[in-house]
Amino acid sequence: MTSTPIPATPDTGPDPAELASLAESVAVEAGELALRHRRMGIELAGTKSSRSDVVTAADLAVEQLIRDRIAAARPGDTVLGEEGGSQPGAAGTSGGSPAAAVSWVVDPIDGTVNYVYGIPAWSVSIAVAVGGQVMAGAVVNPMTGEVFTASAGGGASLNGAPLRRGGDVPDLAVALVGTGFGYTAANRAVDGWVVGELLPQVRDIRRIGSASLDLCMVATGQLDAYYERGLNPWDHAAGGLVAAEAGYTVAGLAGAPAGRAFLLAASLGLWEPLHDSLATLFADPRGTRPAA
Ligand code: LIP
């Protein structure tokens, strides 16, 4: 596939819709490569934060393809990827100034454990930030053919159909809440206690295993809310924009932005009571204790 470089318009910077279109086409092609690798068999390439935090040969190959496509289309942009870290663009910075610099945030396979086990809940997640603000994103689930795309101010879509928030969930007791757990034992002990305390307060819990898909499922209404702590930027950057552009609130604790410390996505009416319940639980001594 060849890509025609997208000209940056110096007065307004790159068009978010064009960035989203490029992110989508690259994510779809990358998803096809990930599927081919899956069909050839899983080849483990190493581990990261723990023995269960695995890297496959597909992770590495898919991220390299994404990097190659971005470099062909926008050679000056920085790329931050889960496997290869942050690599500046050929021209150092793009956009002409730090405020307009374009950086890509890439998770080649989000939901790696699902990928390894053949569970159809993993994605290619690609976000694009301008001056540090996520402006475009694409999340592709190659197993289901779902292509989620969003651009700042341009809305979110699933396979081209607009995604718009449905009616508010009346209260926590009928909310279907997604969550996830980091790979380190210390976090898992705390997260397990918190989710155990939350479970009686809500309809039910779902642990999908891919933050980007959790966030897209909030956008489609398949989840009423999703929270997690310990996420990396590449896990949530694109899916967070999809949920936000679909009309959902995506933020952190006590007014902080969504990030590694905490992320909660829900409709506004549900966001606040769920935030308050989780803030109380994570502030509880039992919710802050390190693992034994
Ligand atoms: C995964 C996240 C998921 C989290 C997992 C893991 P990965 O990302 O998407 O939400 O619960 O522990 O971090 O490692 O598969 O790219």
Image (tube, rainbow, N blue to C red):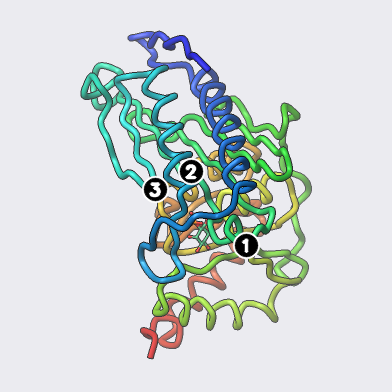
CB at mark 3 closer than 8 A to ligand 1? yes
Q: Quadrant of residue 158?
A: top right
Whether 290 is drawn above or below 249: the answer is below
| Residue in front for this viewpoint, 185 or 38 | 38
Q: Which residue is identified by label 3?
A: 82
Mark 1 and 2 residues: CB-CB less than 8 Å, in contact? no
Dot 1: what SS?
helix
Q: Nearer the viewer, mark 3 or mark 1?
A: 1
The three-letter code of the residue at mark 1 reads Tyr
The three-letter code of the residue at mark 3 reads Glu
Image location of residue 60, percent across then percent down:
42, 44
| Residue in front for this viewpoint, 143 or 239 | 143
Residue 175 falls left or right of residue 18: right
The three-letter code of the residue at mark 2 reads Pro
Mark 3 and 1 residues: CB-CB less than 8 Å, in contact? no
Q: Which mark is on residue 117?
A: 1
Q: Specify which label sits upstream in the sequence, 3 or 1.
A: 3
Residue 134 falls left or right of residue 115: left
Badge 2, how many Cα within 10 Å: few under 14, some, many 20+? many
Q: Which mark is on residue 196?
A: none
